Structures are given as structure tokens and as C-alpha cells.
Amino acid sequence: MTQQVLNINNTQIVSGTENMTPGEGGAHTRLLWASVPPFSARPDVTVSIYSAEGMSNAGTTFVPWSIEYVPGGAAGGRDLIAISAANTETGLETDVDVVCSYLAIGPSE
């Protein structure tokens, strides 16, 4: 996991890259709970999801289908961003390592 935090005036910018884990629905889904410094209001969140192996798994594509923000210091004083993804080939289970890069921008606390 890598995460960077930048505060400019009243704006907080958090970026990070983390491995996603298979979701409860099976190996055709992936999930990431990213712990971030608290924001004073819901941030704008952008994600990019890709294979950790690069082009060796060019036929496997995961896309985000849900991004949830859990405010209020839910994780030991930090906020949470839940990112869910699914394989574009419906139901196709795979053991590919999937990585998520995220960017959250919003008002700092």
C-alpha cells in the first residue's frame, strides 16, 4: 500500500494504490476498504483498477461498480472508502492480482 496526503488551504487530496481482495461474491469480484484521513464532507473519488501483472493478463478486465464513503472516523479516527469491482466477463472467476489506484479530493477537517 502507498498513500499520499496533500493539504492545500481547506482542500485535502489523498491518493493511494492498494491490492484488492476477492469479494464475498467470489473470485470474479474484488473489494478494497481504503482508510483515509477524515474529510469534513464527502470527497470526490476517482478510481483506476488494473492487473498487478500488467499486460500478461490483458484479457482480464475489472471495472468499478460501487464506491462508498464512510465518514466520521469509522476506522480509528480515519474515514473509509469502499471500492467494489467485477470482472467484465460476468461470473468468470480468476486468480489475477488486481490493484486499485484511488484519488479523493474534498474539504479537509
Image: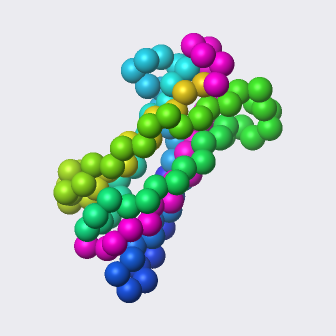
Above or below, 16 against 32 in this view is below
Identity of the residue drawn at 46% across and 55% down: 45
Q: Quadrant of residue 93?
A: top right
Instruction: Give the extent of the magenta segment.
Output: 88-109
Left/right placement of residue 6 relative to residue 68 reads: right
* Image coloring type: rainbow
Q: Nearer the viewer, residue 53 or 89?
A: 89
Q: Is residue 4 magenta?
A: no
Please indicate, yes or no, whether residue 95 appears anywhere in the rendered image: no
* Residue 77 percent across, percent down from the top left: 20, 60
The residue located at (53%, 19%) in the rendering is 27
Residue 34 location (% of width, % of height): 39, 49
What quarter of the picture does the C terminus occupy?
Answer: bottom left
- Determine whether 106 is above or below 84 in the image: below
Image height check: is 73 above or below 56? below
Who's the residue at 39% across and 21% down the image? 24
Q: Nearer the viewer, residue 99 or 44?
A: 44
- Residue 40: tell me if it is visible: yes
> Could you tell me residue 32's position as x and y percent?
43, 40
The number of discs equals 0
Residue occupying the point 71% across, 27% down: 60
In the image, taking residue 29 as reference, residue 77 lies left or right, namely left
Percent position of residue 92, x then y: 62, 14
